[in-house]
Image (cartoon, rainbow, N blue to C red):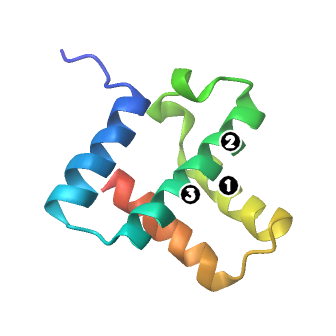
Amino acid sequence: MRAEASLPRLLERSFTERLMQQRQASANTVASYRDTCSLMLRFVQERTNKAPSSLSLRDLDAPVLGAVLDDLEQRRGNCARTRNVRLAAIHAFFG
């Protein structure tokens, strides 16, 4: 049985292999997805008191991701359009 890949490694591969090489995403898209991941990791770090490097995919379940998006709307004042962009970035990572 294969050990679970680390979250930092999965994020790195998501950016370097999937977004940049396979999808040839624009620099703006990569920056937007990077910002989403950064905000998500900070939120989960605050909530779990775990360093981002020690987080696993189990820490990023649907209720947590929903809470991340809700927090972005409430604390940062993101509109529905921005929330949807952040959701697209999350979908791309898990896809």
Residue corresponding to mark 3? 35
Tell me the mark number nearer the camera, choosing from 1 and 3.
Answer: 3
Q: Is residue 57 left or right of residue 47?
A: left
At 64% from the left edge and 51% from the top edge, which residue is drawn? 39
Q: Gap in Å between the C-alphas at discs 1 and 3? A: 13 Å
- In front of the other: label 2 or label 1? 2
Q: Amino acid at mark 1?
A: Val
At horizontal 18% and vertical 15% (from top left) the residue drawn is: 1
Residue type indicated by callout 2: Arg
Q: Residue drawn at (42%, 31%), measured in percent from left and top?
A: 8
User: Residue at label 1?
Assistant: 68
Q: Which quarter of the image is occupied by the C terminus?
A: bottom left
Quadrant in the picture for residue 11: top left
Task: Give the secondary structure at mark 3.
Answer: helix
Question: Residue 60 occupies which quadrant of the picture?
Answer: top right
Q: Residue at x 73, y 63 (%)?
A: 72
Residue 20, percent across and down? Answer: 24, 58
Q: Earlier in the sequence, mark 1 or mark 3?
A: 3
Identify the residue position indicated by label 2 in the image.
42
Q: Could you tell me how far apart the alpha carbons at marks 3 and 2 are, in whole angstroms?
A: 11 Å
Sequence-first tag of 3 and 2: 3
87 above or below 37? Answer: below
Picture disc at residue 87:
none
